Amino acid sequence: MKHAWTTTAATTAGVLALALSACSGGAGTTAGGGTFTLAISADPGTLDPHATTLSVAHQAGLFMYDSLVAVDPSGKEVPALAASWKSTATTATYTLREKITCSDGTPLTAADVAANINYVADLKNGSSVTGLYVPAGARAKADDAARTVTVTSPTPDAFLGRNVGSLPVVCPAGMKDRSILGQGGSGTGLFTLTEAVADDHYTFTRRKDYAWGPGDWKTGTRGLPDRVVLKVVRNEATAANLLLAGQISAAVITGQDKTRVAAGDFFQRALRAPLGELWFNQSSGAPTADPEVRRALVQALDLEQLRTVVTNRDGQPATGLSSRGRDLARRTPSPGTCRATTSPQPRPPSTPAAGSRGPTACGARTARNCP
């Protein structure tokens, strides 16, 4: 059955991303190495990047998996696994970088990449990211000798090159046995998952052999942590307390704790982001397939009152379904305090997957490097 969904943005709110003593656990430390601990608000569940649309799972996947194309902080597309690419609305061709290896040491080939695309495109596999990255029914062909992957879509997609290029690429071991992906990983990313304790924490260890990356990334990049820990902290007040006590390195704060946390002496960045989206199922036979029903449901809401409650009086009326994430305020740490950078988490410009639901906040992603 074909499913269609629409969304209405109810409000926007300030999102505060903060980092404290980010690189190695002690205030005043500026060197790389050590452990960076980031609070996440929910357990990611399955870590199979082709079987989840949860933003927290995608955040974990960013450490383990690369894509063909990346997006830099300015929104520009830059090379990732692909050294170059070209695309139209119905075809896209990617040329892989040389000497890319998986976390188990296996070389990544064009055929491996094509297998990922074909898996997601085949509706029989039930991937939750079909249509988000890869159009249903698309076909990918590989030329290992030329290191090229050519994708043909049965339907036009103005962002085909970027969407397919954003698909997390799973290595052969994970494609052969997807059961290892649920609480493990099989990718070409900068980090590997070395410990997973559901509802508590996920520990990633940096690969010393990683010699590729987005854009002009260099192996000598300073400030990279040796380990990254995603710590599940469901209560935002608790996350704020841990941050202020120096027990975690970074957190994203969206609620009433922003005021007290913002007074701290560490790096912080405030963003304006969508919060509280309403999703309607337009499948045939569903009540909300009728546009008049959807319109009535939205008009019945007191959006001003809802905005006041959801954002603790900090929200503004939404003017669109996306935000540039413009800085509202920023404070840098005192000299000697480890610094971190944040940027809006990239998302392919395509229709949300059917598993998406609101209300959710478009979060800020704390970058892995601390110069």
Image (cartoon, rainbow, N blue to C red):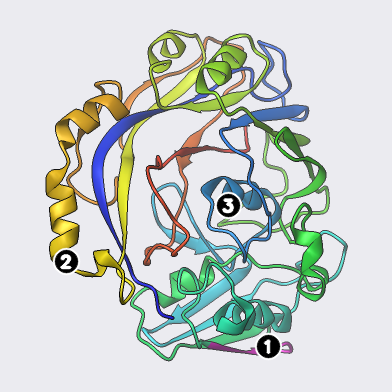
Tell me residue 279's x, y (percent). 32, 55
- What amino acid is labelled 3 in the image? His
Amino acid, disc 2: Pro
- Secondary element type, mark 2: helix
Q: Is residue 143 magenta?
A: yes
Q: Which residue is mark 1?
A: 146
Report, in whole angstroms, how far the alpha carbon at label 2 lies from the one at label 1.
Answer: 50 Å
Which mark is nearer the camera, 3 or 2?
2
Q: Which residue is mark 3?
A: 58
Figure check: 208 above or below 175: above
Above or below 17: residue 362: below
| Left-right relation of 108 to 17 | right
Separation of residues labelled 3 and 2 (CA atoms): 32 Å
Q: Secondary structure at mark 3?
A: helix
Determine which quarter of the picture holds residue 231. Answer: top right
Start and end of the magenta stretch?
139-146
